Amino acid sequence: MTIPLIFDTDPGIDDAAAIAILLTNDEFEVRLITSVAGNVSVDKTTNNVLKLTHYFNRPEVKVARGAEKPLVKPFKDASNIHGKSGMPGYEFGELSTKTISKKAVDAIHETLNSYDDKTTLVAVGAFTNIANLIQKYPQDLKKIERLIVMGGSLTGGNLTSVAEFNVFTDPDAAKIVFESDLDITMIGLDVTEKALLTKQSMSELLQMNETGKMLMGLFGHYQDGSDAGGKPMHDVNTLYYLLHPEKYQLEDLWVDVVTDGPAIGATVADILHSTHSQTNVHVAKDIDVPAFNAWYLLQISGISDGNINAGRLEN
């Protein structure tokens, strides 16, 4: 049985690592991919999605351009981590795919209501598009099976001492999402900073096939983690969780999002269950890292060079 989903993303190198699986694994029925401003501007994240739908020869996958800035706070990208384009290191050539005319929020609305069954949402960038959907089309919540997000942290941030990047980028959107009554699973830094693609795994990727070379071209410019210690595959975790939830340890908690002051972007969990009688998020707290590495290598190794539109490594 396939998982029907909408993937909201801001590529970004680890986003590309996830989209490589999304577009090549038959267990996912990709109904829509939406872009959002985050790691780089929305113009660049949209173009990067198109690079990947072109590369993996998936012209039928609908791609919609999303929000160009957060709801309230000024936009600041993460090009220091992902490079100026968001995906440096590989030249994808002339693109054969393009966006649809509808903006992301309207495309999500249309997609959700085009099917009789419910759709899973996966959000691995700022949550602006999802918040816009909740505000503009609140009736659509009943069409969403669940929401899996990469974002947040219970134990410290990667943008500030307390804030994870995706939540920090648009904390007001994250607050709307977390208070929406959606069935939310949060896979944050508590897990993704453990889910490192090891040096050995990266060495195997390089020798594996053209897709492995493409990914290693990108990873060579990825300024998160280290070559020696491993590179965090933050966004890949959302897809691994959907296919292998047994590899994660989760706890149901109430999570608040701080939207102003020095702790802006922090995700604060009521770990002691002292201030809330209910919970609103399933929080991932641990992962089987060796299983994650083995699974990722297996996924990439199965991508035939004959099914892609290969480009070339950038100098």
Image: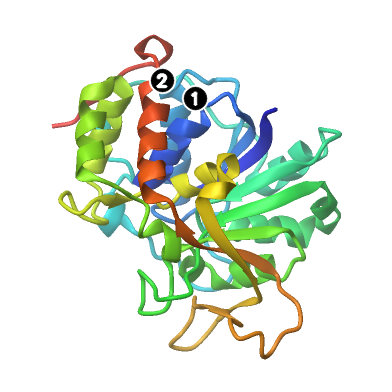
Q: Is residue 248 visible?
A: yes
Q: Amino acid at mark 1?
A: Thr
In the rendered image, which residue does mark 1 sit on? 24
Name the residue at 72% across, 85% down.
276
- Mark linked to residue 161: none
Q: Is residue 5 above or below residue 23?
A: below
Give the structural element (helix, strand or loop) at label 1.
Answer: loop
- Which image quadrant: the C terminus? top left
Q: Alpha-carbon distance for marks 2 and 1?
A: 9 Å
Name the residue at 20% across, 43% down.
199
- Name the image quarter holding residue 95: top left
Q: Foreground mark, 2 or 1?
A: 2
Give the structural element (helix, strand or loop) at label 2.
Answer: loop
Asked whether 166 or 209 is in front, the reply is: 209
In the rendered image, which residue does mark 2 sit on? 302
Q: Position of residue 219 (x, y in %)?
A: 25, 42
Q: Position of residue 255 (x, y in %)?
A: 62, 75
Q: Is residue 35 visible?
A: no
